[in-house]
Amino acid sequence: MSLGFVFPGQGSQSVGMLADLAERHPTVRQTFEEAAAAISRPLWEIVSQGPEAELVRTEITQPAILAASIAVWRLWKEQGGPEPVLLAGHSLGEYSALVAADALGFAEAVRLVHRRGQLMQAAVPQGEGAMAAILGLEDAGVEAACAEIDDVVSAANYNAPGQVVIAGTAAGVARAIDACKARGAKRATALPVSGPFHCALMRPAQDAFAADLAAADIRLPRIPVVQNVDAAIADSANGVRERLLAQISSPVLWTRCVQTMVAMGATRLAECGPGRVLSPLIKRIDGAAEGFALGSADGFDAALAAEAGKGG
């Protein structure tokens, strides 16, 4: 019964996130100021005041979520929270996990995800790509439905059993939604996203980002990080780098990542960052696992007290 940390990705952002923690702890604002200096963007002002239209721009969303996640991580350590034995992050959250594991410097990670966001946004013109959530259909059914479509569309996020996100061209996703419903999906709905992430349409972004990752100072994580593309732990810094690059156009194997963490003994999984997206998924993936979120003052304090009671 060990502690693991999971870090959220794009979609967990909201105007006002971490406001109650920032009121009590200067570390939150200080972390955002570091991130803002790295990319010359007023991140805290955007996060705290909006407008939402600015926050949801991928090149802003990604460094903002990274900053929020590392602010919570720093606060956890500052308040004497026990160190987790395993880490993982959902998509963008993998960068947060690597910063927490001392495999990547914070400022460099902020610059990387800012650049990553720019490239991902530019890879497909607005409106030409899409993503959709498919609920109540097994993975194989979703994959078979996508395979029927004569267009670019594929599974992008395996979030939990019966919950898969698909991505591709707008036309391909629309047709795949119908195909998934015909196969028995309980619900299949388009998502309000700015691009078709984690599919073949992101290959131009992946190719362009290769040079940025090659130049980055990436080290072997001090705390093992389960990575998205294969739900495995890299045994070298180059392995970490290769998986980060492949992740841009490959599906996020989140179900398998959580299963790997639980199998390795991390059955208490803290969602370290804004929002509460990953915690409910954890319970769906493994009913014996406990997921809880640290992104609010009440949630943070309750988790800190609970872990102190367990003795780490």
Image: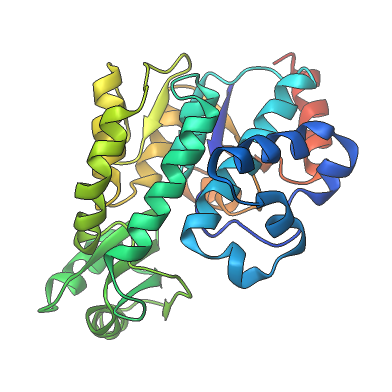
In the picture shown, does residue 209 fall above or below 53?
above
How far across and how far down the image is residue 10, in percent? 50, 55
Q: Nearer the viewer, residue 133 or 198?
A: 198
Above or below: residue 280 compared with residue 189: above
Residue 149 x/y as whole percent: 14, 78
Residue 59 appears left or right of 227: right
- In the image, residue 2 lies at what x, y percent? 58, 20
Image quadrant for the N terminus? top right
Image position, residue 139 (x, y; %): 28, 60
Quadrant assignment, res 23: top right
Q: Left or right: where does residue 93 sit relative to residue 162?
A: right
Q: Residue at x 34, y 58 (%)?
A: 120
Does 283 appear above or below 188? Answer: above
Check the image and tell me how it is coloured: rainbow
Q: Residue furthest right?
A: 24
Count the marks: how many? 0
Quarter that holds the C terminus = top right
Q: Residue at x 42, y 18 (%)?
A: 221
Quadrant hosting residue 256: top left
Residue drawn at the location 25% of the way across and 79% of the way down: 176
The answer to whether residue 179 is seen in the rendering is yes
Q: Tell me: 29 left or right of 63.
A: right
Name the residue at 54% across, 44% down. 39
Q: Of all residues shown, which one is farthest toward the front? A: 40
In which image quadrant can residue 48 be found?
A: bottom right
